[in-house]
Amino acid sequence: MTAQIEIIDVQKHYGSFHALRDINLTIPKGQFVALVGPSGCGKSTLLRSIAGLESISGGTMRIAGEVVNDMPPRKRDLAMVFQSYALYPHMNVRDNLTYALRLKRIPRAERHAKADEVAKVIGLEALLDRYPRELSGGQRQRVAMGRAIIREPKAFLFDEPLSNLDAALRVKMRKEVRALHDRIGATSVYVTHDQIEAMTMADHVVVLRAGVIEQQGRPMELYDRPANRFVAGFIGSPAMNFVPAVTGTDGRSVTLEMTSNARLPMDIQIAEGRPVTAGLRPEHLEICAPDPEDGMTITVGAIERTGSSCYLFSEEAPEIIIVTDGATGVQQGERIGLRIRPERVHLFDRDSTVSLRG
Amino acid sequence: MTRLIRSLRDGIGFDTLLIILALFYLFVFAGLPLIYNVIISFQRVDVFSLGTLWHPNVGFENYERVFNDPLARRVLINTLIFTIGSVALQFTLGFAAALFFHQRFPGATWFRGLFLAGWIMPGLVVGVLWNWLLSGDFGVINHVLKSMGWIDSAIFWRSDTAWSLYAVMMANVWYGMPFNMILLSVGLAAIPDDLYEAAELDGANAWQRFWTITLPMMRSTIGAVLALGVIFTLQQFDLFAAITQGGPAGSSTVAQYWSWELSFREFDFGRGAVISVMMIVVVLFVSLIYVRSTRAETRL
């Protein structure tokens, strides 16, 4: 596949603040890439740098093979969907959709035909004569998408486009955006702070923190093989449990530093006596009968039931969260045993926080 | 009685009371004088009958005398030139300055604030300052023009019938420009940055962004600024009083100054009122534009 967007060693400084460090990212044509991370991690800055709304301080950026470091946004042929939608308030939906075509001096009849076509794709045929102020949040969102689609740009840039919608609509639009992408097959870069959006929509997820790419890969790769403790904690909901542990003398097990001093067998060989952090996903912990020997045992503190599933919180520190079947009969105050398959235990070096699974 | 008091304290009675107070004030101090002004424009009012509330009716005699006055035509043309010229220049310069200070550079807001210094000065003081600047013998303006080689001999701005009106206009443009700039700056600041960014990504260059985003988004602000500009210019009196006193030979007399002259120099209050009445009609019309503009503002 040809690279549509290539980002090589890109740096961004704001005065003495280093907003992006050594960013390397290659986005093949037609791929849907999500940039995800906590606020202030640089994901929006990276997106705006691709758009040309921010200049980069170092490195190289190529779009469709052409170096764009000093190219103004209007020459880059990219379409952006803003968090605020940034619809032109003084234009009706049709004029909003065709604004870019008007600038290109495309004849009126052709413009309107195109607007009708795009309106059909995004389901806005009936609203073409309305003004943005007369639309609901979801409809505005669609207009913003339509304005991007109509241009057939080299790539789509999305800046948290769903964060102003209510939860139900967000789930619906998530699917629609992805379906639209599959239909037109355009290269897309999608910024979000919501790891679920990133996981469900993207082909390739880039996790950023403090201006650095912590890990990138397919969504399930990040879930199954997080490169470090940050990514492990960021991907997955509820977040992974982290328990301090020490590897056993045989190098094939770890002992958790919990009140119950549980010993977990491992499927990999590790140096003995090494202080580590064990990462246990709440959905990977299974409830079993308490094993007083060297099994993991906790006392159930709070219980949250969502109907389909049930979250159990341990009473002891460090707090352990377990996700289990919604129909579970576990009661508050009950002592329960926990087990986990060895290959599902994540181990991180306690100082560098890097994963020991390599 | 207690119900009335309770309504005043807790209910909509309080809102009504506030509205009544404001309306009462407006009626007594703005409505009545306006109506009285219209009435005396149809009456003969001179120094001897000034003390009485009611004066002899003369029908349209005052109006006829004003329109047949040899000065009337001059005053009408002067007022048009002065108003249109002042508003156009104040607006263009104000908009240019607003756009300039909208660019982000160090000290932009600070410099913009300095511009207001001119606006908060009393009109008479501004007039006196411009008197010096415009002075034919020692004025700075003549000095600059001469050293640039643009004129050979001094222009006597205030005493030359060809220049006197423009002398006042210059001062008025300087005086009113900061107000235009501030209102337009507020309008510019209200346009979200992401609209410009979206337009930029849509392929608009700076010029296209100005015409397709800035101007249409500023429509209501521009309407309001122009309407207020016309009203303030029609009110401008201090500068005329300080710089030319309407002269020489009426060459810089505008409607508002003429009205004052007729009323308070010639003590012919009837004719003075006639001019006021006609100006009220113009201002009412402009106010309508202003109200419409500000209403559109809240709708966006």
Image (cartoon, helix red, strand yellow):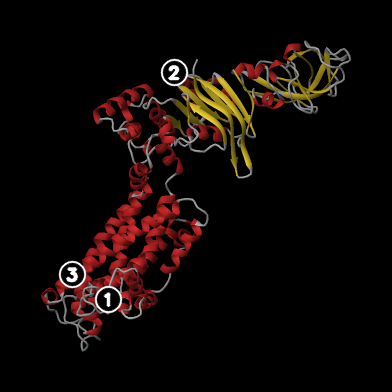
User: Which amino acid lies under the numbered mark 3 shown in the image of this protein?
Assistant: Leu
Q: Chain of mark 2?
A: A
Question: SS for tag 3?
Answer: helix
Q: Chain of mark 1?
A: B
Looking at the rendered structure, which numbered label has been put on residue A269? none
Q: From the viewer's perspective, is residue A81 above or below residue B161?
A: above
Numbered circles on residues, count = 3
Question: SS for tag 2?
Answer: loop
**Is there a contact, CB below 8 Å, between mark 1 and mark 3?**
no
User: Which amino acid lies under the numbered mark 1 shown in the image of this protein?
Assistant: Ser
Tell me the quarter of the picture where residue A241 sits.
top right
Distance, label 1 to label 3, CA atoms, is: 31 Å
Q: Decide which of B27, B121 is in the foreground and name it.
A: B121
Label 1 neighbourhood size at 10 Å, few (<14), some (14-19), many (20+)?
few
Distance, label 2 to label 3, CA atoms, is: 68 Å
- Give a yes or no on whether discs 2 and 3 share a subunit: no
Q: Quadrant of the C terminus of chain B?
A: top left
Residue B33's x, y, as percent?
28, 73
Read off the residue under disc 2: A185
Q: Decide which of A316, B211 is in the foreground and name it.
A: B211
Read off the residue under disc 1: B153
Q: Chain of mark 3?
A: B
Read off the residue under disc 3: B76
Tell me the quarter of the picture where residue B260 sits.
bottom left
Tell me the quarter of the picture where residue A238 sits.
top right
Mark before the other along the chain sequence, 1 or 3 = 3
User: Which amino acid lies under the numbered mark 2 shown in the image of this protein?
Assistant: Gly
Label 2 neighbourhood size at 10 Å, few (<14), some (14-19), many (20+)?
some
Residue A239's x, y, as percent?
68, 25
Residue A312's x, y, as percent?
71, 22
